[in-house]
Amino acid sequence: GTTILASSSTHVTVYCGPADDACKDSIDIRFGTGDSVLECLSNKACIDFGSINVQNSHSFTCSGSCPNSVSNQEFSASPTRSPTSPTKSPTPAPTSNPTAPTKTPTAAPTFSPTK
C-alpha cells in the first residue's frame, strides 16, 4: 500500500479521488502537527482504507464518503488549557467620558437582572 509521511508538516489535506479506489489497499497516512483533513471525493475512493496517525495533529476531519474507522477518529482543535493572562498595564488612552458613580446605592441587591 501507499504511505504518506507528513508528520513533520503542519496543516495537511489529503484528497482521495475523484477516481474510485484512490486511497484503498491499506494506505498509511501520518498527518502533521496542524489541522489534518482527509477528503474522500467519491463513494469508493476510501474503501478498504488502511490507517491514519493523527496523534500529534491539532484537529482532524474527514469529509465525503469516509469509512467508519476514519470518521471515529475525528476531533476538533484543542481547547485553551487555561485562561489568557490579563494585560499588565492599563490602556494609555482612557475613556474621556466615564460614567458617574451612583449617589445612593441600594442596601440589598435585586435577584433578577435588568436588561
Image: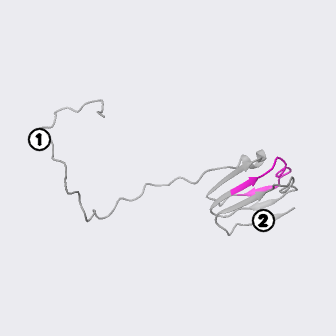
Q: Answer yes or no: do the residues labelled 2 and 1 have beta carbons within 8 Å?
A: no
Residue 47, given in percent of the width and then of the height, sits at: 85, 49
The dot on residue 4 is: 2
Q: CA distance from mark 2 to mark 1?
A: 70 Å
Residue 114, given in percent of the width and then of the height, sits at: 29, 33
Going by the numbered disc 2, the residue's amino acid type is Ile
State which quarter of the image contains the N terminus.
bottom right
The dot on residue 103 is: 1
Residue at image point 34% right, 61% down:
87
- Magenta residues (range): 37-53
Outermost residue, bottom direction?
A: 8
Residue 16, given in percent of the width and then of the height, sits at: 79, 56
Residue at image point 61% right, 58% down:
58
Local SS, label 2: strand
State whether residue 22 is above or below residue 99.
below
Residue 112, given in percent of the width and then of the height, sits at: 30, 30
Going by the numbered disc 1, the residue's amino acid type is Lys
Left or right: residue 93 compared with residue 13:
left
* Residue 38 forms part of the magenta stretch: yes
* Residue 27 forms part of the magenta stretch: no
Local SS, label 1: loop
Quarter assignment of residue 104: top left
Front residue (pair 60, 95): 95
Residue at image point 78% right, 65% down:
4
